[in-house]
Amino acid sequence: MTRARIVMAGLGLAAAIAAGVVVVQRRARPDPARDMMRKTLPAWQTARTHNGPAGGDASRALFASARPWPDVATAFEAMDHAWPDNTEVRGAARTVNRALAAARLPYFVDIQRVGEQPIALSYELVKRVPWRIGARTVDVLRLRRLDTLNIELGLYGATDEGLPVVLLDRIESSLAETLPLAELAFTVARLSSVPSSSPPLLSMSSWVASCE
């Protein structure tokens, strides 16, 4: 290989590496909206449940995080002033969700009452799926939990004034818990019905795969 070709190959490799670095940096770039929903909003909720005042440090941090989206910031301020009135907080959260949708931010706030307090849970909006009910079509929201508040819901979905939502994280958690038990029950049932001289049994997952 000539010196010129070696130089050209080296330049091409350097350019490819530089392009890869740029792609990695773009992917690793923080998303301020996601941080707002995953960290700042739960921090606000924790502060309010521990007697933090409306307009306090956590509230100001939440408003500041939403500053790029003025309608979202205004809706958060209304939710802060409404807390802990359950009805008013729910109304404010619906305004937050409308503002998030208008700003094309794929996130969602759900209010759950825990004891006497309304708790704001934050979700990523994974997908909107149109669902037809007779002549009526509604959007079903598929959500995945973002916050790490110590609150676990026992439901897989809910409706808020006619808006149905599906909680994907709860479905995934339930499957992770129940599938091993189903596998065990399947194996025990087959062992009890097959003579000991038969060939080794397949697991449930292997058996299902062999039937496809």
Image (cartoon, rainbow, N blue to C red):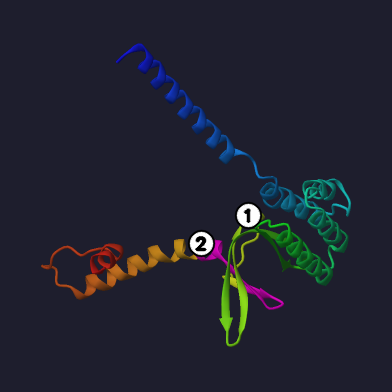
For disc 2, the neighbor class at 10 Å (few under 14, some 14 to 19, many from 20) is: few
**Rendered residue at 81%/55% (across/down):** 48
Q: Would you place residue 36 above or below residue 101 in this image?
A: above
> Tag 1: residue type?
Leu
* Rendered-image quadrant of the N terminus: top left
Q: Residue furthest top?
A: 3
Residue 172 belongs to the span the image colors magenta = yes
**Rendered residue at 31%/70% (across/down):** 186
**Rendered residue at 43%/66% (across/down):** 178
Inter-mark Cα distance, 2 to 1: 14 Å
Element class at badge 2: helix
Depth check, mark 2 against mark 1: the one in front is 1
Mark carried by residue 173: 2
Residue 31 belongs to the span the image colors magenta = no
* Rendered-image quadrant of the C terminus: bottom left
First of labels 2, 1 by sequence position: 1
Q: Is 123 on the left or on the right of 83, as rendered?
A: left
**Rendered residue at 33%/70% (across/down):** 185
For disc 1, the neighbor class at 10 Å (few under 14, some 14 to 19, many from 20) is: many
Residue 103 point in image, percent of width and height:
73, 57
Residue 75 point in image, percent of width and height:
82, 60
Q: Is 195 on the left or on the right of 177, as rendered?
A: left
Q: Nearer the viewer, residue 41 or 15?
A: 15
- Tell me the magenta residue range: 158-173
The quadrant holding residue 92 is: bottom right
Residue 53 point in image, percent of width and height:
88, 53
Q: Which residue is mark 1?
A: 146
Q: Residue furthest bottom?
A: 134
Residue 44 point in image, percent of width and height:
78, 52
Q: Would you place residue 21 above or below residue 95 in this image?
A: above
